[in-house]
Image (spheres, rainbow, N blue to C red):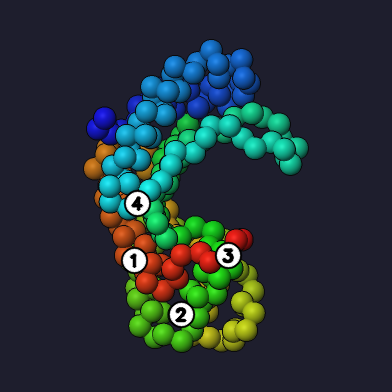
Amino acid sequence: MTFEGFTVRASDFLAKLGADNSKQFFDAHRAEYEEFIRQPLEDLLAEAEAVYGAGRVMRPNRDVRFSADKSPYKTTASMWAGTVGGVYLSLTAEHLQAGGGIYDPTRDQLARGRAAIDSAPRAAARLGEIVGTLTAAGFEMAGPSLKTTPRGYDRDHPHIELLRLKHYAALTTLPVDASPTAIRETWSAVDALIEWGDTYVGAAQSWP
């Protein structure tokens, strides 16, 4: 099906789930979840996969095995599509968060990204340009960045702020009822960041 956006019914469901995060509530309102959240996310995922590569809609269930919070369900809903970097969208009761890049890179990915920033002037200049353009457009780099200097680099390095990045991803906030066009334009805005990651970071070779 064609993605047509989210409605206030999606917000209402997540707000009510936040107030009554129980299996009883979820089971009683599962049809609302499927119609107003899951199906639109699946439709959006199909559109994203055609451009960015394979992805998935995240499960609504929380992993509570090692958490003091035993609430069974997430009060957000999200999807991701991409190969190395990709695009992301998360839905809460109040807003959407959309963007993309490489979030939570592995150690080897982060090492390659920092090596490129340090030793390849073109890579550093291009990333600086991308970050500047995105922040000027209202995006925030996924973070937080390191507060200290990465091991092996000088604190006076000319690109120290780029070296301190822990994620090569950027996000912005949209209203829940943002149009499909607005979401597509948000994703298009991070295409350059995804391309940078594909070129200079590459696929993970280890985990984590």
Q: Residue at label 4?
A: 53
Residue underneath mark 1: 195
Q: From the viewer's perspective, tell me whether residue 49 is left or right of residue 74.
A: left
The answer to whether residue 139 is left or right of residue 184 is right
| Residue 170: mark in rendering | none
Secondary element at image label 4: loop
Q: Secondary structure beneath disc 3?
A: loop
Pointer 3 or 1: first along the chain: 1
The residue mark sitting in front, 2 or 4, is: 4
Could you tell me the amino acid type at mark 4?
A: Gly
Q: How far apart are marks 2 and 1 (CA)?
A: 15 Å
Q: Is residue 160 above or below residue 64?
A: below
Q: In this view, does 197 lie above or below 158?
A: above
Callout 3: few (<14), some (14-19), or many (20+) C-alpha neighbours within 10 Å?
few
Front-lying residue, 175 or 78: 78
Task: Tell me which label, 3 or 4, sits earlier in the chain.
Answer: 4
| Label 2 – label 4 distance at C-alpha | 26 Å
Q: Position of residue 1 (x, y in %)?
A: 26, 30
Q: Which tag is nearer the camera, tag 4 or tag 1?
A: 4
Q: Which amino acid does label 3 sit on?
A: Ser
Q: Mark 3 points at which residue?
A: 206
